[in-house]
Image (cartoon, grey):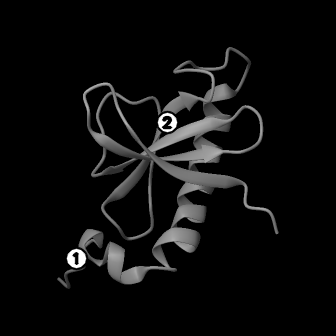
Amino acid sequence: MISPYITYREMDSEGRLCYYILQKAYPNYIGIISLGQLENVLASMPVGNYNMYINFYGTLVGRFLPAYKDALQEIETELVSMAEWFYYNRILTQPKKYEKYKVAVTNG
């Protein structure tokens, strides 16, 4: 089965190495993966029981929002799919690498 997403790392404009997930199909949405929830983003989705989020970052051609009806709902749905894919295809394949980001569960 062909994967609907790819992940990649790239330096941002401030010189920080960032981790991204890209939708291969049109409209090629990009999510930036963060530790903790970012503020002032259009949409954000948690990744499993980890302190990681997929945050809307734009599209392959730039940081813009498509101007058609229900675009925000489409983006949120895509972020859910990205978070699930990231969990199954990155975290579960290398659980030790992501152990430190797991949310601690307390009883009580």
> In the rendering, at what x and y percent does residue 49 appear?
38, 71
> In the rendering, at what x and y percent does residue 105 appear?
25, 79
- The residue drawn where x is 26% and y is 32% is 15
Q: In which quarter of the image is the C terminus?
A: bottom left
Choose top left, top right, bottom left or bottom right for residue 22.
top right
Q: Residue furthest right?
A: 1
- In the rendered picture of this protein, how many numbered marks are placed on residues? 2
Determine which of the numbered discs, if any, sits on residue 14 in the image.
none
- The residue drawn where x is 20% and y is 85% is 107
- Closest to the observer: 76 or 91? 91
Q: Mark 1 points at which residue?
A: 104
Q: Which of marks 2 and 1 is nearer the N terminus?
A: 2
- The amino acid type, in three-letter code, at marker 1 is Ala
Q: Which of marks 2 and 1 is in front?
A: 2
Determine which of the numbered discs, if any, sits on residue 56 in the image.
2
- Say which element carries label 2: strand
- The residue drawn where x is 57% and y is 63% is 84
Q: Is residue 41 above or below residue 51?
A: above
- Say which element carries label 1: loop
Q: In this view, does 26 lie above or below 101?
A: above
- The amino acid type, in three-letter code, at marker 2 is Phe
Choose top left, top right, bottom left or bottom right for residue 16.
top left
- The residue drawn where x is 45% and y is 29% is 42
Q: Residue furthest top?
A: 67
- Closest to the observer: 41 or 89? 89
> In the rendering, at what x and y percent does residue 96 appear?
34, 82
CA neighbours of label 2 inside 10 A, class few (<14), some (14 to 19), many (20+):
many
Q: Tell whether 1 sits left or right of 34.
A: right
Q: In which quarter of the image is the N terminus?
A: bottom right
Q: Tell whether 8 sits left or right of 6.
A: left
